[in-house]
Amino acid sequence: MHSGGMLAGWKFSNFKDGVFGELFHVNDPDGNLALLPKEIEPEEACMLSDMVPTGFHGAELADVQFGDEVLVVGIGPVGLMSVAGSNLKGASRIFAVGTREVCREAAKFYGATDFISYKDGPISDQILALTSGKGVDKVVIAGGTVDTFAEVMACLKPGGKIGNVNYLGSGDFVKIPRIDWGVGMGHKQIQGGLMPGGRLRMEKLAKLVTCGKLDLSKLITHRFQGFEHAEDALMLMKNKPKDLIKPVVRVEK
């Protein structure tokens, strides 16, 4: 994360050759490689390099505080960690937007108190109905499209914050409704960013696991043994069956 230019971690998984090799070159190892505590299984440790820091960063960007009511849009693996991060940061009520049962069960485990389905109508209508028309204090966007911002702005109280960790790979504009933004006077903020990574970040997150405050096993729904199953795991990620959260392939020497 700390060298090789902007989006260096993203380049590792998209452009750099040899990622699946037995030996792999990592830039600036002192800043990027962390020692794995013996209490953490390698499968769960995989989540510490991406899913956990990205999801937690959503809660950081939204500036979740004690007692906040938080809306998390999208409860895939990143969104689930946004739920967990918001819970650890002291959120009271956590609304999770998603429809797959396996993800809803995991979200409840990580601290979600209420569930919303986009199939049941606009998210904003459901949130306002559940909060007596007041809306929520903070929003974490971990899924959706460029149009999601307009809808969640209507869910947000004046003075609230939106933290986005969803990569917007298409669409020309992010449009913000004038009235729902408080005609520019509502002190509603949007922040988006790539999660911080590196050794220090991963070691701190690992402490949450070793002290029993974060159980990452719920993120892994499919476990494979042997490199020959790498393609199987990748195809699961492509096809996204209803019972999938994350697949992991364990390769022993």
Image: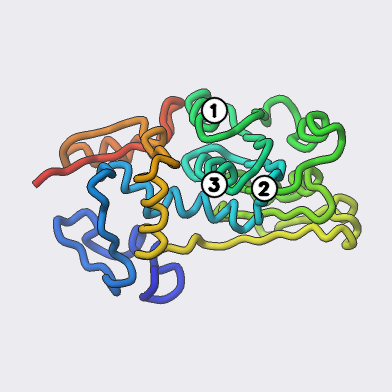
Give the mark nearer the N terminus: 2 vs 1.
Answer: 2
Foreground pick, 206 / 161: 206
Tell me the CA gap for discs 3 and 2: 12 Å
As measured in the structure, the alpha-carbon distance from the residue carrying label 3 to the one carrying label 1 is 16 Å
The residue indicated by pointer 2 is: 66
Q: Are marks 3 and 2 in contact (CB under 8 Å)?
A: no
Q: Which residue is mark 1?
A: 104
Q: Closer to the camera, 52 or 4?
A: 52
Q: Amino acid at mark 3?
A: Gly
Q: Which residue is mark 3?
A: 85
For the residues labelled 3 and 1, say whether their Cβ atoms are less than 8 Å apart.
Answer: no
Q: Secondary structure at mark 2?
A: loop
For residue 238, say whether it is visible: no
Closer to the N terminus: mark 3 or mark 2?
2
Q: Residues within 10 Å of mark 3 (few under 14, many from 20)?
A: many
Kindly report which numbered mark, 3 or 2, lies closer to the viewer in this rendering.
2
| Label 3 vs label 1, nearer the camera | 3
Residue type at numbered disc 1: Arg
Measured as percent of width and height from the top left, residue 111 is found at 56, 34
Query: What residue appears at the point 54 percent right and 47 percent down from the top-left corner?
Result: 85
**Residue placed at 58% from the left, 44% from the top?**
143
